Image (cartoon, rainbow, N blue to C red):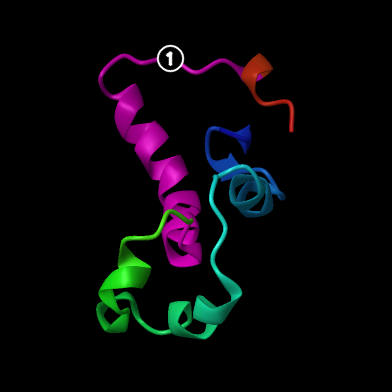
Amino acid sequence: MRMKSESEVSDDFVDHFVANAGGHLDPSLVDLAALKWENWPPNLRAMSFTDPEFISTFANGAPPTIEWLKTFGIRFFPWMYRF
């Protein structure tokens, strides 16, 4: 994970995740992907691409999740944060 520290994701966290997440969305479905997930047609839900809302939620949840993991004795080291 690209982090500045245990409590802050890197500035390019979302962009890097999107660029390296895998599949790409068919251009004809981009407008449908802008709808709320509940309104996506089944074929869009089944496609392999990274939902921007998921990435945003993931980025926002990373710091508190790290804090939670630390309560179980998992350690994170400053040298890990190079970005």
Main SS type for the magenta part? helix
| Residue type indicated by callout 1 | Arg
Q: Is residue 41 above or below residue 14?
A: below
Give 29 or 73, whichever is nearer the viewer. 29
Q: Residue 23 location, x and y as percent?
A: 53, 51
| Left or right relative to 38: residue 34 | right
Which residue is drawn at the image coordinates 46% and 62% (left, top)?
51
Looking at the image, how many numbered discs can be counted on the residues?
Answer: 1
- Answer left or right for 1 relative to 38: right
Q: Quadrant of residue 1?
A: top right
The answer to whether residue 31 is magenta is no
**Magenta-highlighted residues:** 50-78
Q: Is residue 40 depicted above or below 18 in this figure?
A: below
Identify the residue at image location x=48%, y=82%: 34
Residue 81 point in image, percent of width and height: 66, 26
Q: Which residue is mark 1?
A: 75
Q: Camera-side residue: 56 or 40? A: 40
